[in-house]
Amino acid sequence: MKRKLVSALLVSTMVATAFVGCGSAAEETTDSAATETTEEGASSDDAIANLIASTEGTVNIDLWCSETEEYQTVMKKLCDDFAAQYPDVDLNITLGAVSEADMKDRVLEDVEAAADVFVFPDDQLEALVKAGALNEVAAQYTYDMNETDTAATVEAGQYNGKQYGYPFTASNGYFLYYDKNQLSDEDVASWEALTAKAEELGKEVGCETANGWYLYGFFKGAGCNLTENEDQSNNCDWNNETGLAAAESLQKIASSKAYKSYGNDDLLANLNDGKVVAYVSGTWNVNAFSEAYGDGYAATKLPTFEVNGEAKQMASYSGYKFVGVNAYAENTGWSMLLAEYLTNATSQEAVYEATGEGPSNTEALAKASSPALDALAAQSEFAELQRVGGNYWTPAESLGKNILEGKVSQKVLDDAVAGITQPVE
């Protein structure tokens, strides 16, 4: 079992709270060492020097992050650079590949055996905190996120007023990639124009409709609502008159022979074959689209779609990614210092250069510019944080499949909403 260590040198110099314990839960301590306030003249360098001086033997840190080659490569380099800064400390950082979409589930399988440091999207924060899987970020060694990162990102890493995530990226949303050598601005403005042009070209366009993350954009754009309750159940009105009209509109769009609903692997395969000229995706695929489209590479906000004869802007989820420190990290102080290093301005710039994902650090963000980030910014007006209970995803997937198969009816929507809003057991 991993031991949860007191980062005493951090807290005694910088902060008024620490965590200790060995077992299934962390305990707060209020002893004099933990509650000592920062003395005048004390600095973050003092805290780091004290941490180094108190370290004996090998410092083992497991880090889990995205399985993509780009992420694995850049994070490996950042970890090596971090270790090189402390030549007197035997740092052994092991990199693991875990999809961010699956991070919460992997961590919660066995929190104590999970990675010491891991990257996760903002919608997983609440569940991780409630399960006792995250250390509170009560203080920092090297920078103050409230001064360096966007306020929205910092806030998204909080739960009940406490900070649990180190801001990492601010681009976890979706928009439309397209080949501007084959499609005009008018072609990509609406789904109706886009599918018509793709049919003319004999090419493919689309969106992963049988996926609740994207399906939400059509219903929300039409004027429907989906919200999460305190008990993690959902409120949903997609079976009202507007919802039925939205489903019928999407079914009509999806009936085009040019419209495809690919999962990510199938999307990339067909993109590489030159079949796909426009598709809804996010910054994680920026390299794939830029390579496939070459000098035609472009991106823009999501298209509109017609509902009862009126153009409606497709909505979307926005999101952020964080680096978290496990509440049972073997070496808490070093894990927190690594988390800070991975999320500082220089590291966020490196991640952006490698993956295309937009920084949350304002200094790094000022240096980042790309069609994908510009599209994300344009879509942000129509986006909101994903806050939805777990009972949403399976019924939403089934609803998307029914729409793709042309099975749109009041009963189909009633059944979907019944599943989405079922009580949490």
Image (cartoon, rainbow, N blue to C red):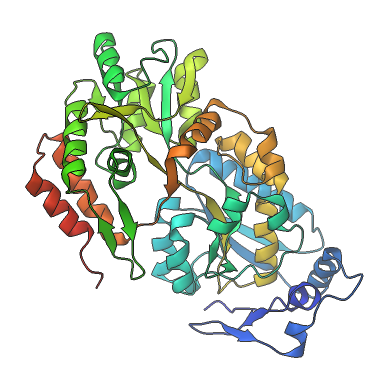
Q: Is residue 298 left or right of residue 182?
A: right
Identify which residue is drawn at 59% across, 36% down.
Answer: 354
Identify which residue is drawn at 47% across, 46% down.
Answer: 67
Q: Position of residue 51 (x, y in %)?
A: 78, 71
Identify which residue is drawn at 26% across, 38% down.
Answer: 209
Q: Position of residue 60 (x, y in %)?
A: 64, 66
| Residue nearest the viewer, comparing 289 with 281 | 281
Specify whether residue 170 is in view.
Answer: yes
Q: Position of residue 185 (x, y in %)?
A: 42, 15
Q: Is residue 46 left or right of residue 211?
A: right
Q: Is residue 311 left or right of residue 93?
A: left
Q: Is residue 95 above or below residue 314?
A: below
Q: Position of residue 365 (x, y in %)?
A: 66, 39
Q: Quadrant of residue 155?
A: bottom right
Q: Residue furthest right?
A: 41
Q: Quadrant of residue 404?
A: top left
Identify which residue is drawn at 16% across, 41% down.
Answer: 244
Q: Is residue 390 above or below residue 344?
A: below
Q: Is residue 13 above or below residue 104?
A: below
| Residue nearest the viewer, comparing 266 with 416 | 416
Specify whether residue 203 is in view.
Answer: no
Q: Is residue 126 above or below residue 294?
A: below
Q: Is residue 63 left or right of residue 42?
A: left
